Image (cartoon, coloured by chain):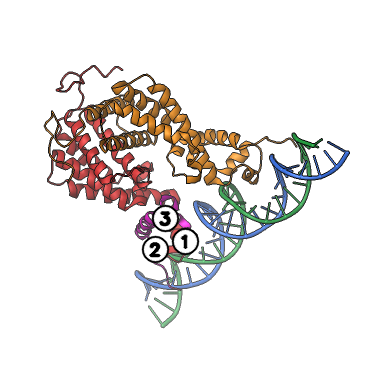
Chain colours: A red, B orange, C blue, D green
Amino acid sequence: MARAGLNTDRLVAAAAELADEAGFDGLTLSALARRFGVKDASLYAHVRNLDDLRARLALHAGGELIDRIAVAVAGRAGRDALTAFAGAYRAYALEHPGRYTATQIRIDQSLIADAPAMRRTAEITYGMLRGYGLAEPDLTDAVRLLRGTFHGYCVLESAGGFGADRDVRLSWDKAVEALHLALTHWPRETAGTGPADEKTEDR
Amino acid sequence: MARAGLNTDRLVAAAAELADEAGFDGLTLSALARRFGVKDASLYAHVRNLDDLRARLALHAGGELIDRIAVAVAGRAGRDALTAFAGAYRAYALEHPGRYTATQIRIDQSLIADAPAMRRTAEITYGMLRGYGLAEPDLTDAVRLLRGTFHGYCVLESAGGFGADRDVRLSWDKAVEALHLALTHWPRETAGTGPADEKTEDR
DNA sequence: GTGAAAACCTAGGGGCTCTAGGATAGGGCT
DNA sequence: AGCCCTATCCTAGAGCCCCTAGGTTTTCAC
């Protein structure tokens, strides 16, 4: 009987497809083995267990995502960079729901070590924000706001949570513009041109 | 042998506790039955299946969440209302991670019918935003931005996604303030006091 | 008390994860 | 060519989960 020629990389690649088709919860070792015409026990030679497979998929997908974002952001700054970042992010999340879900799981520290994707993501994100002239801790606060918004928006849209009769794409563009506005007029202690300038740190 | 005295409501209440303790994925019919000293097959007299239990929990938790928000928002308007809304939302999500996760699942239409929680949520959210003087479709866009941001932020924080050495509470307050700023200066076609005033609808 | 409905049970099928240990294909070595 | 060795793939089986079918027992209304 001819061998399937499995290895970890092919497994992860197939897992990515399966996750997108069947959902992240549908990514199971049994289904993956079935896809290769192999028994599920055979997979344990290439992958430690299900969590290991998920973690590898997370890193794989995280790399894909940041690659796309890097291409989109390249050569842009300020508002253009933010728009490009947001567009690439949302496009990936919608095109690859299973992969995208994988990128959000908490993964084992031992695997993170040799994963440049995490660092690249931080670099690109902070780099994009540097154009807004924010300093710590505002920078961290802004990153958290962006991450939260992008993630939450994509999750809700992907899950069909936006029922209103309004093109989500248009809403998204408005949201990104609102974020750009928030970043340019980021609330600080003293400075400010708008009407909202109270003390805010000690609420 | 004495009976456990099960019924659907007690099951849902216990499911809420179990989900918070073991995570939403740890909410299983077997574990729930074990908690009552009963065989899992016995639960099917009160609940159609696992999805049904999850949907009931979703409505239960959704009601709790919006009740808390309603109390927090009552009597407030504008920025105060937004801050109270956000605080109640985040507090519930962090205190009850399993319940909160449940509120985000896609549930069967047949159960939604007699669920006032959904309508109340929409009413309170739109009511809070009316103070900002937004009209459709900006209102829908703003609601989506808020939902996305609140949800994404809570999910990431709850999953330990915010590793930086910065009190998340402070970041959250800043994020809410930034959203308030974005809402007060919501990007429209013509009006605007800031530097960002291009056409934006047809990007 | 008695009858009926509701509550709970056993038995069992099917899917999933994962371990232990056995067979075999293929490449490298002599 | 023949041999060995290792990675590859297998069978067998345990444990947990969901869910169905059908039987037994408690409880309540009459």
Could one spot residue B194 in this view of the protein? yes
Is tag 3's residue or tag 1's residue first in the polypeptide sequence?
A: 3
Is tag 2's residue or tag 3's residue first in the polypeptide sequence?
A: 2
Q: Which residues are magenta?
A: A2-30
Q: Do discs 3 and 1 share a chain?
A: yes
Circle 2 marks a residue in which chain? A
Residue identifier under label 3: A22
Please tell me which residue is depicted at 43% across the width and 54% down the height of the picture: A27
Marks 1 and 2, how far apart at CA: 9 Å
Please tell me which residue is depicted at 30% across the width and 29% down the height of the picture: B129
Marks 2 and 3, how far apart at CA: 21 Å
Residue identifier under label 1: A42
Question: Could you tell whether B147 is left or right of A126 in the image?
Answer: right
Amino acid of disc 3: Ala
Amino acid of disc 2: Leu
Q: Is residue B25 magenta?
A: no
Is tag 1's residue or tag 2's residue first in the polypeptide sequence?
A: 2
Q: Nearer the viewer, mark 3 or mark 1?
A: 3
Q: Quadrant of residue C8?
A: top right
Circle 1 marks a residue in which chain? A
Q: Vertical placement of B73 versus A126: above or below?
A: above
Mark carried by residue A6: 2
Amino acid of disc 1: Ser
**Residue B50 location (% of width, % of height):** 54, 45
Which type of secondary structure does the marked residue at label 2 adopt?
loop
Few, some or many residues within 10 Å of mark 3 (<14, 14–19, 20+): some
